[in-house]
Amino acid sequence: MDRIDRTSGEFRDALELYERASLLELGDLADRVRWRLHPEPVVTYIIDRNINYTNVCVADCGFCAFYRRPKHGEGYVLSFEEIGRKVDECRELGGVQILIQGGHNPYIPFEWYLELLRYIKVHHPIHIHGFSPSEVVFFADRFRMEVPEVIRQLRSAGLDSIPGGGGEILVDDVRRRVAPKKALTDDWLGVQEEAHRQGLRTSVSMMYGMGESSADRVEHLFRVREVQRRTGGFTAFICWPLQPEGTPEMSHYHKTDAVTYLRTLAIARIVLENVPSLQSSWVTMGHKVGQVALRFGANDYGSLMMEENVVSAAGTTHRATIAEMERVIRDAGFEPRRRRQDYSLVEPVPLTAA
């Protein structure tokens, strides 16, 4: 797939901007891109629920405090009925989608995933944003299938879109160091591109702060941009720092600060002019920084996050009500609007569950 030339003028210019520009200059450049793409003074958000159907995983990522090895006493697989109850609770709050992700669990057969999707669509109908690219690659390897066939069957059973989880840093040297058992860059992006070919929209993410270089982060953005140029299938980009608290192998890393987050968000908005939306990661950074991010390139405030297990397992948890999220957005000078996964707007409804 794409090979990024780090000696090119375009790459060096982006890297120099990321490393050397003042914080306010970066923010201003990103804000200009944001207003060019989204000229209305609106910030969107979505009401959804993150359902982790299993925490059993054999990927052994050093940055993850959520997973449990097979046969661990705290390992679980949710029943269809439990998942259905979670979907109903989400819908009662006005939720329009569920985000369903789990570990690389070698004991779950492929048919279970297909039956789960069918069960939700029949008994608890809602938009299903599910199964990260790393999970799709795991399914292909585990069940000896080709990635296009995995996606085709998931889509046929009811999958509506794919989240960008497991992106970390899309540079193989980094991925081999921090998550050696997970999909490498070409495979991870290959799932995204194949999903786009089959008509699924996806999001794309970056988790930074694991000892990678600034050039690694910029290369990640360039790789995303090249896929988007071919497919146009990414709806949004989300970045956040490693949450080292509570992680088994990376607690020695210092959590990067708000300035680094804002710089990273801003350079992403500048480089990724072809990705329509950028989310503010208030769940990891808190509302004050999340609000500032709306002037550093973000046009979306992410999710209400009824349930979040992975980040909170590492010791970082920020919560919000609908009313609080809308207040934060208004205080930043924008009109809050609810959206769907494809960023179409939901008609306003009275706040009944704030």
Image (cartoon, grey):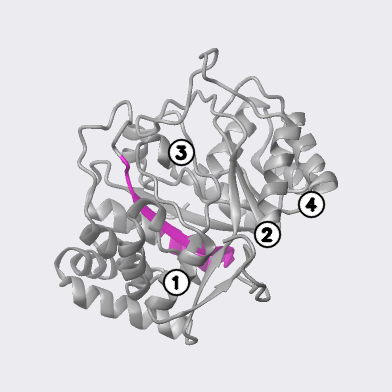
Residue 113 visible in image: yes
Q: Is residue 333 left or right of residue 93?
A: left
Q: Nearer the viewer, mark 1 or mark 3?
A: 1
Residue 310, numbered label: 3
The magenta stretch is 223-243
Q: Quadrant of residue 148?
A: top right
Residue 128 in view of the camera: no
C-alpha separation, residue under disc 3 versus residue under disc 4: 25 Å
Between discs 2 and 1, the one toward the N terminus: 2
Of the two numbered discs 4 and 1 in the rendering, the one whose residue sits closer to the viewer: 1
Circles 1 and 3: CB atoms closer than 8 Å: no
Q: List the residue tagged with mark 4.
A: 125
Earlier sequence position, callout 3 versus callout 2: 2
The x, y position of residue 222, in whole percent, is: 38, 61
Which mark is drawn over residue 96? Answer: 2
Disc 4/disc 2 C-alpha distance (Å): 10 Å
Queried whether the magenta region covers residue 59, the answer comes back as no
| Between discs 4 and 2, the one toward the N terminus | 2
